[in-house]
Amino acid sequence: MSDTITLPMQVDRLPGAPTHRPIGPCTLVILGASGDLTRRKLIPALLHLLGDGLLPDDFMVLGVGRKQLDDAGFREEQRVATGADPKLWPRLAPQLFYLTLELDVPDSFALIAERLEALEAERGAERGRLFYLALPPSVYPETIEGLARSGALPRRTQSDPRWARIIIEKPFGSSLATAMELNRVARAAVAEHQIFRIDHYLGKETVQNLLVFRFANAIFEPVWNRHHIHHVQITASEAIGVEHRARYYEEAGVVRDMFQNHLLSLLSLTAMEPPARFQSEAVRDEKAKVLNATRVDGAVRGQYGPGVVAGEQVPGYREEEEVANGSPTPTYAAMRCLIDNWRWQDVPFFLRSGKRLPQRLTEIAVQFHSPPHLMFPLEKGERIAANVLVFRVQPDEGLSLCFELKVPGSGMRISSARMEFSYQEAFGSGEHDAYETLLLDCMAGESMLFLRNDSTEAAWRIVDPVIEQWEREPPPGFPNYAAGSWGPAEADGLITAAGASWRNS
Ligand code: NDP
Ligand code: BG6
């Protein structure tokens, strides 16, 4: 609201040093090291961790990719691609090694095991191994089986100092059936505590803060239910289009790409019951329970046409490189979800995500009920805004709470005020990349921010019926929203039926 008064919130206690468990000697094996994820996320995250003094002293990376490179070539390629800080780079570069391999060739996994043993023998110390699947999802099953068969990824107990873990990137399958099969393959190879299914949204600062906000403050729990909350809106909007990932996106679409993982993770943290302990399994039990009670009760799909984003004319989805002419792939979806339990019965959770929307914004907005009776005299047509608590995940991570107050002066005028808390202002740090947190957690064996098999399957159970119906029925006049708009008009109907509206800023 333009006449909203903003009241900054203060932090009066600064945090101490990061509280990560010390990590012993460790080797990170990146499978798919010549790819986009490695240069855009993984190597930059390692550089930041190194700069912050959080990497183990004895740490190395073995990159595996099809591209013909030697160690020096791989180091140079990563240095250029990441625009590495010239002060930090000389500390990381000598720890990077590379192995050229076709993973679909039978003996390749034995070669990984051999190279690892040779590199580790030079260092002497007992060490952990972390395998990162930065590969096309189609090769995950054979890769996991190959790593296990060759002995490179052995089954280990939780307390073994020679720990062996595997990070599996999203998408984790493409349906409930394929996710169950991938879970079966992974659990046949290693124990569940060795498997880390990544959802990078769980590593974002505000997402982790949801747990602290909900369970370290007693004032919110009594109102965190159907008696006080009117609805919840979870938005993950992106201004970017499909970029260079059309081949993947054409098969995935927005529901597999954003809903099955990121949006349902946000929903589960917002709606779950308080765990009894701040312990990985206790938190993951509650997340799985709430997902098992969630269902979709109405959905709208969209695909962007040409339009203007940030003042720039951009093509429609069907005009993007490697996208089929009449592609039916949705780039936008809005869903009304219901959670069938005592706390949330009949409270709609509206989820939406899309590409080529006006801005990059991820937030969870919890809207409370309006007062049941209003004693104040209001002008005709004047309304009082409901209280809204917003967790801003990105950009500009923070929290805000909107409430009503009296405008000073004679007479009774009411205005909205927004209490604002900004991480940047309070703690002075910029956006902290989720991959840093997640890589470090995995090296420390901390699995709370990773997905357990039951949550992954529960999330597919929620979205599968929508995907199946949309793949059966032709799309409704795609493209149906212009790039730079807030999505198709039908999405408004989904939320206005509940007496609410989208928070389009
Ligand atoms: P890329 O296509 O850029 O890279 C894939 C990598 O896998 C390349 O190193 C490629 O080698 C290698 N590769 C492919 N097939 C084989 C094979 N048969 N044998 C050996 N190596 C192979 O993909 P991304 O890096 O973008 O993505 C990797 C994974 O991460 C995907 O599952 C993706 O969904 C996920 N992800 C990616 C994100 C991103 O921002 N990029 C974000 C979130 C998840 P070569 O280059 O020689 O072909
Ligand atoms: C990825 C999706 O998981 O998340 C992408 O595959 C999307 O399509 C990205 O752009 C968004 O992540 P973030 O951290 O930029 O919100």
Image: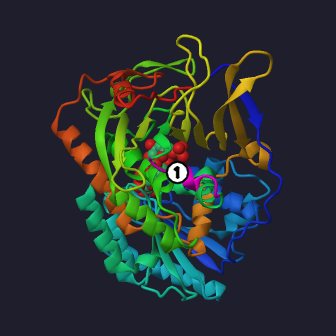
Q: Residue furthest top?
A: 380
At 38% across and 25% down in the image, what residue appears?
492
> In the rendered view, does 277 fall on the left or right side of 400?
left
**What residue sits 31% from the left and 32% below the top?**
300
In the picture of the structure, the residue carrying the numbered disc 1 is 224
Question: 348 or 159: which is nearer to us?
Answer: 348
Q: Secondary structure at mark 1?
A: loop
- Residue 311 percent across, percent down from the top left: 57, 17
Q: Quadrant of residue 66?
A: bottom left
User: Is 256 displayed left or right of 429 in the figure?
Assistant: left
Going 36% across and 72% down the picture, which residue do you hit? Answer: 144
Give the percent coordinates (x, y) of residue 396. Answer: 67, 39
Task: Look at the image and tell me whether residue 255 can be seen.
Answer: yes
**Is label 1's Cβ within 8 Å of ligand 2?**
no
Where is residue 399? Give x, y as percent: 65, 43
Start and end of the magenta stretch?
218-226
| Coloring scheme used | rainbow
Choose top left, top right, bottom left or bottom right for residue 192.
bottom left
Q: Quadrant of the C terminus?
A: top right
Q: Foreground: 291 or 385?
A: 385
Q: Residue at x 26, y 58 (%)?
A: 176
Left or right: where 439 falls relative to 192: right
Q: Residues within 10 Å of mark 1 (few under 14, many from 20)?
A: some
- Asked whether the viewer can see residue 251, the reply is no
Q: Residue 119's spot in the image, x, y percent?
A: 58, 80
Q: Amino acid at mark 1?
A: Trp
